[in-house]
């Protein structure tokens, strides 16, 4: 159970970092990538919903409820998912 | 406390992954006039820099910080908190004062009476500072602002009342931006509080040793399986530690991804409220310390105690004192007596629970703004630390006292801490302060207790030696025996 939770975490976080564009940060303080990602999950229902909206198909795949074909379509549509992510 | 009435000034600090605070001692040795003296601790954030001039505290700010200030000054929350004294009173002043400096504008801050650092605070003080920080976050977010950093050093104290001092920390919050200072809040507030609340361990040595605070990775190994169920541990410590490790090598900017995804301010509000709930519910763990019950367990009978109080009251009443130190203050009985004749009293003791008792009591009292309780071990007071060793200042450079109370402390310095009596008296004299000092004789049961397990190597610990040393360095004005001659108390002025 705990293992599933940890994997879920890592999976969601990995997805968040795929195919993103970069912009210049304008803070003198380094917020920490991991701490920023965590803030999504600390945003309560809204944060989780946001994550869900973005990565619903990937999430379904993780828990085995989503089809692989559907996944790949989603990835193509996004155009940024790497092969390494598919195997997770 | 008016600026003119204060010798010390605090302002900001900037820390890598940290914010800031600053201090300088503006004594008669400071430049007399018109020469700005930069604050050595104010360097991290390039959007501003604190300097001192003519005993006042100023902050040069960049064009970007100026734009933020102009909007901030019109907000309701800023006026409210500044009006209550929980944000340092600040005004924009004539720009000409910054001539030659790279600033777009200059702000002037009301100085705080004495600068202190989180490693000198009690659990309750750190907790209240954390709650103020979170309340400011919530109030700011409501009006489109955010605190861009979360350094505990950005909070100072006016007596027992916390004051937020780092004005440029308030920035307009751009939609989609996360709370950049979240990790820093954890490292400088949440984790030290958890260490004390959940493990019963003193957070001060940790903060004194690590100015950036305690990382998730440092706290995680100290937590037991049972601790994982305590409020906030799973997400704020364990998950954060795991995520930081997992993503420490990433070179991509996840902030923009969040913004694109529709991350909004309500998620930050939710997190801040959750943190507020966790912090509010925390209580200091650990057993009672030696002096926690001093007020009810001190070694005096009632008549002697009254005589001691009377002596201190009369000595303090000789004049008005701008700053008093009460070293070895215990639960602050004599700090309060002296506060009647002083602008500000810094009450210090090495026993954190005694200081906590004083802090909690002061919060509710009418003289709450007059007495600053600090946890300080006088045999090892806070040193200069940080960049160049000047970012955080030694205790003695943050505002020396005009009057010092040193009551029932000397036996702890000489016998417990092994500091030669002559050296201790010289140190007191070096402060340039008037002095109310109590000598605790060898016959006193408190000294007997200290000696019970030690070789008696303290040949200098005698009343005649003490009086000779005191007379060498001070002008003794009054004295009287206490406790049937086991103790003596003196009022002395510095040699002119």
Image (tube, coloured by chain):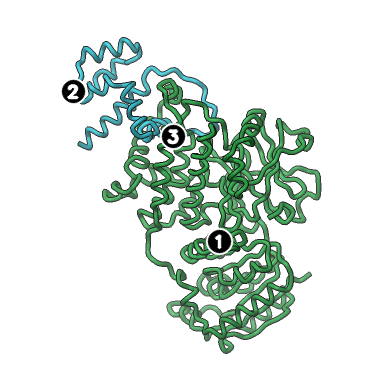
Chain colours: A cyan, B green
Q: Nearer the viewer, mark 3 or mark 1?
A: 3
Looking at the picture, tell me which residue is in the foreground, B366 or A5.
B366
Q: What chain does badge 2 belong to?
A: A
Q: Check the image and report above or below for A29 versus B161.
A: above
Determine which of the numbered discs, if any, sits on residue A64 in the image.
2
Q: What percent of the width, then of the height, locates residue B210?
A: 49, 47
Determine which of the numbered discs, if any, sits on residue B268 in the image.
3
Q: Secondary structure at mark 3?
A: helix
**Whether marks 2 and 1 lie on the same chain:** no
Determine which of the numbered discs, if any, sits on residue B373 in the image.
1
Name the residue located 60 percent from the left edge and 68 percent from the top edge.
B335
Q: What chain does badge 3 belong to?
A: B
In the picture, the quarter occupied by the C terminus of chain B is bottom right
Q: What percent of the width, then of the height, locates residue B153?
A: 55, 47
In the picture, the quarter occupied by the N terminus of chain B is bottom right
Asked if the residue at tag 1 contacts the one at tag 2, i.e. Cβ–Cβ closer than 8 Å, the answer is no
**Whether marks 3 and 1 lie on the same chain:** yes
Is A40 on the left-hand or right-hand side of B358? left
Number of numbered discs overlaid on the protein picture = 3
Q: Secondary structure at mark 1?
A: strand
Picture quadrant of residue A13: top left
Is B134 on the left-hand or right-hand side of B345? left
Q: What chain does badge 1 belong to?
A: B
Asked whether the viewer can see residue B36, the reply is yes
Q: What percent of the width, then of the height, locates residue B182?
A: 45, 38
Is A52 on the left-hand or right-hand side of B152? left
Q: CA distance from mark 3 to mark 1?
A: 33 Å
């Amino acid at each position: 159970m705990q293992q599933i939770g940890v994997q879920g975490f890592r999976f969601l976080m990995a997805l968040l970092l795929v195919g993103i564009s970069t912009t210049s940060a304008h803070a003198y303080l380094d917020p920490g990538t991991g701490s920023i990602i965590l803030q999504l999950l600390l945003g309560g229902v809204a944060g989780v919903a946001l994550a869900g909206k973005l990565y619903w198909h990937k999430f379904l795949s993780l828990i085995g409820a989503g089809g692989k074909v559907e996944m790949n379509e989603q990835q193509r549509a996004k155009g940024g998912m790497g092969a390494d992510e598919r195997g997770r | 406390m008016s600026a003119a009435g204060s010798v010390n000034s605090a302002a900001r600090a900037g820390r890598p992954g940290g914010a800031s605070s600053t201090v300088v001692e503006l004594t008669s040795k400071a430049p007399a006039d018109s020469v700005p003296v930069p604050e050595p601790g104010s360097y991290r954030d390039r959007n501003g820099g604190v300097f001192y001039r003519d005993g006042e505290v100023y902050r040069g700010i960049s064009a970007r910080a100026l734009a933020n200030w102009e909007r901030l000054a019109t907000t309701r929350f800023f006026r409210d908190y500044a009006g209550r004294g929980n944000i340092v009173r600040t005004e924009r002043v004539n720009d000409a004062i910054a001539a030659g400096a790279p600033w777009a504008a200059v702000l002037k801050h009301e100085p705080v009476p004495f600068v202190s650092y989180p490693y000198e605070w009690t659990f309750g003080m750190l907790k209240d500072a954390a709650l103020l920080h979170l309340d400011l976050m919530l109030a700011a977010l409501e009006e489109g602002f955010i605190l861009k950093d979360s350094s505990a050093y950005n909070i100072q104290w006016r007596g027992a009342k916390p004051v937020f001092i780092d004005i440029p920390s308030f920035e307009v919050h751009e939609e989609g931006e996360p709370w950049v200072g979240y990790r820093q809040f954890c490292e400088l507030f949440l984790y030290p509080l958890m260490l004390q609340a959940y493990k019963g361990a003193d957070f001060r040595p940790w903060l004194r040793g690590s100015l950036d605070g305690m990382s998730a990775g440092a706290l995680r190994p100290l937590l037991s399986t049972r601790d994982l169920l305590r409020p906030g541990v799973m997400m704020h410590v364990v998950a954060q530690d795991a995520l930081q490790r997992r993503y420490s090598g990433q070179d991509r900017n996840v902030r923009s991804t969040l913004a694109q995804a529709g991350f909004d301010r309500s998620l930050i509000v939710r997190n801040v409220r959750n943190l507020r709930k966790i912090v509010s519910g925390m209580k200091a763990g650990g057993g009672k310390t030696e002096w926690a019950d001093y007020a009810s367990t001190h070694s005096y009978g009632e008549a002697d105690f009254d005589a001691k109080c009377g002596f201190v009251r009369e000595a303090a009443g000789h004049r008005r004192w701008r700053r008093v130190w009460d070293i070895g203050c215990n639960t602050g009985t004599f700090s309060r007596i002296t506060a009647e004749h002083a602008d500000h009293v810094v009450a210090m003791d090495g026993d954190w629970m005694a200081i906590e008792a004083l802090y909690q009591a002061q919060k509710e009292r009418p003289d709450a703004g007059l007495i600053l309780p600090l946890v300080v071990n006088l045999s090892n007071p806070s040193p200069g630390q940080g960049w160049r060793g000047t970012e955080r200042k030694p205790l003695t450079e943050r505002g020396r006292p005009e009057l010092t109370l040193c009551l029932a402390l000397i036996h702890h310095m000489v016998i417990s801490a092994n500091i030669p009596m002559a050296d201790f008296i010289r140190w007191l004299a070096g402060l340039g302060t008037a002095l109310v000092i109590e000598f605790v004789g060898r016959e006193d049961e408190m000294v007997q207790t200290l000696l019970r397990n030690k070789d008696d190597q303290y040949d200098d610990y005698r009343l005649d030696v003490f009086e000779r040393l005191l007379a060498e360095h001070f002008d003794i004005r009054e004295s009287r025996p206490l406790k049937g001659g086991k103790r003596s108390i003196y009022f002395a002025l510095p040699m002119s």
